[in-house]
Amino acid sequence: QVQLVESGGGLVQPGDSLRLTCTASGRNPSSFAMGWFRRAPGKEREFVGAASDLGAQTRIADSVKARFTISRDNTRNSLYLQMNNLIPEDTAVYYCARGKFWSASTQAEDYDYWGQGTQVTVSS
């Protein structure tokens, strides 16, 4: 059974930084891509970033590319999302997901396991 647990969310002010962590358990988590998605209030879920199985390939949504970076540490079975210069529009629940394949994908249907999410609120 695969489990994904997100942590690191919280309430911050505009301009602050946060680092989200997703820790995976289960069989061979390093054999699959992992990604971050988010859902803001009243909006559809959207892709944020993804890393391939070994982390060599990463993808970041254009809307956050200048401020967010994604990385993974397979020795810790962990995926990270470093978020800098946060703005109110980043307010959302952030979800970690495990891919069906090794390559990083922007499409939610290419992910088969999802975490419970962690709330990020950016407000002054």
Image (spheres, helix red, strand yellow):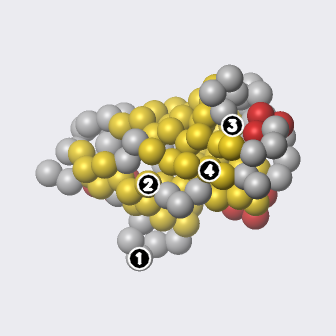
Say which mark, if any, is on residue 32.
none
- Measured in 3D between alpha carbons, the distance from the residue under mark 4 to the one under mark 2, in whole angstroms, is 11 Å
Secondary-structure class at tag 2: strand
- Measured in 3D between alpha carbons, the distance from the residue under mark 4 to the one under mark 1, in whole angstroms, is 25 Å
- Measured in 3D between alpha carbons, the distance from the residue under mark 2 to the one under mark 1, in whole angstroms, is 17 Å
The amino acid sitting under disc 4 is Leu
Residue under circle 2? 118
Q: Residue at x 45, y 45 (%)?
A: 7
Say which mark, if any, is on residue 4.
4
Decide: is 30 above or below 94: above
Q: Is residue 89 left or right of residue 31?
A: left
Secondary-structure class at tag 3: strand
- Residue 52: x %, y % from top left: 75, 36
Q: Is residue 75 visible?
A: yes
The amino acid sitting under disc 1 is Gly
- Residue 39: x %, y % from top left: 48, 64
Q: Residue at x 60, y 30 (%)?
A: 71
Q: Earlier in the sequence, mark 4 or mark 3?
A: 4
For the residue carrying disc 1, how many other residues have a C-alpha within 10 Å: few (<14), some (14-19), or many (20+)? few
The nearer-to-camera label among 2 and 1 is 2
- Residue 43: x %, y % from top left: 46, 72
Secondary-structure class at tag 4: strand
